[in-house]
Image: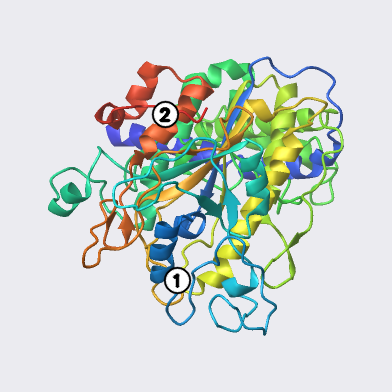
Amino acid sequence: MKDGIHTRRQFLRTAGAMGIIAPTAAAFGLQMAAVGTSAGQTAPDYKALICIFQLGGNDGNNTVLATDTDSWGRYWSARNTGADPIALMPVGTAPVAVGATSPVTGRVARLNSPEAWGGVLPIVPRTANPIPAGTNATTRTFGLHPMMAPMKTLFDSGRMAVIANVGTLIEPITKAQYVARSRRIPANLFSHNDQQSVWQAGQVEGVRTGWGGQFGDLLASMNGNNAAFTAMSTSGNTVFLSGRSVLQYQVSTGATPAVRINGATANSLFGSTAAPAIMRQLIQDTGQAHLMSADHAAVVVRSMGSADALNAAAATPLVTGLRAPPTYTNPVTGATETNSLSVQLQTVARMIAAGQALGLRRQVFFVAMGGHDNHDVQNVAQPNNLAKMAQAIATFDATLANIGGVDFRPMVTTFTASDFGRTFNTNGDGTDHAWGSHHFVVGGAVRGGDIYGQYPTLGVDIAGFNNPDMSGNSMIPRLSVDQFAATLGRWFGVSETDLGTIFPNLRNFPSNSVGFV
């Protein structure tokens, strides 16, 4: 009997997460065009937290770069080599026409080579980042990948912050301690599935609840009868949004579902105008004797009821001039492509707008984009991925500035995450799995225009140089995911006591706040 109860409970959780996909996609995709000007005012303390997960492990070393002479020299020697060098061009370098010779490298520029993109984009932090041991510089200077111009604009305007060298940690660890294995480290470092899980839930693959879902557990009551929309994903089922009581509501960004059985929209079924209502009644029958059948029907009732509520909210005039994402052009090939991340974030914006009609006050969202596991052809894949992310975040930020005449940017905080960083050295035309990396936080509440955390000393060990911040080709994180996440949770409204429960390793670190909000 015990096993039966466990199985039934698991069914309820799993079915609840899966059963809502089709109804939500059906209703939401078709109804959103009807959303217009808000008829009322936004909730006084609405907040949304949005995770953008870069699946595969983004190369942070080519995303946020140290450009002071000492750091750049070590970067250049490590990456300007191999069959297809991945070293970006220095700040101020003009793009070289395809087929022409670069005065910097002496190589002929190709469509997918850094010579053709111009130099990294300089950013100037409002607070000088400390110079770590091993870095020979009087001032640390920084830049972004040349394909991230919209992110530079956000940084310069004080709306975006960089979080340096963050990664999965149990407790602070030095290079010597890591090499000696004298302190605890997360299990299965460099494993995609496990490190995605540690980032999202604090434990390796198999853990059942994530910190986004647990934030939702604590604050879902603020959403009243519409708590079903507390945790929402545009990228399928994710452990990040799995709570102990909150079920993640999964939505599709597509306009047309495979099947729709919805009395509010369907006119006929198998040629009968009466069949849709009858079918709806049958699948919502919770009076069946078998517990599993009754539970399944209860999940369906909840799913269809939630879809109906979201339909109604989406059909109210909440957003003025909310448009589809702008056309995206691949900066490497010049081809027009779909920016799936921008589509997801625009869907999130529409859900935020519709949520106001539902009286929602706290929401957690998850969006994701793959393609970051660049062991090979990194010069083809990463520039396009980073350009898509930059366009998507900038478009989302602009959309939030005016939803129904209200500026939602102070109420929404967006952050990036990824499996892990990449190796500092190139493997010839790409990079391999590593550990620490750099991430972004964007929003009106963010103390932007700064780099938080210690940007590390760069360079692999060579004769006469022992880098305290790297072991082999991998950066050792100085900020933990727990510190990063707890800072977000505190802004979101999670208490210090609850943060200590969700992130038990916080007590191992000297500070539980990074300070970017």
Of the pair 115 and 414, the residue shown nearer to us:
115
Q: Name the residue at 40% across, 43% down.
A: 199
Does dot 1 land on a helix, a strand or a loop?
Answer: loop
- 317 relative to 397, above or below: above
Q: Which residue is mark 1?
A: 430
Question: In the visual, does 223 lie left or right of 217?
Answer: right
- 69 relative to 202, above or below: below
Can the viewer see residue 29 in this picture? yes
Of the pair 442 and 245, the residue shown nearer to us:
442
x, y percent for residue 228 = 59, 28
x, y percent for residue 69 = 44, 59
Q: Which mark is residue 69?
A: none
Residue type at mark 1: give it: Gly
Residue type at mark 2: give it: Ala
Pointer 2 or 1: first along the chain:
1
How packed mark 1 is, by other alpha carbons closer than 10 Å (few <14, some 14-19, many 20 or more), is many
Q: Which mark is residue 486?
A: 2
Question: In the visual, does 120 lie left or right of 11?
Answer: right
How packed mark 2 is, by other alpha carbons closer than 10 Å (few <14, some 14-19, many 20 or more), is many
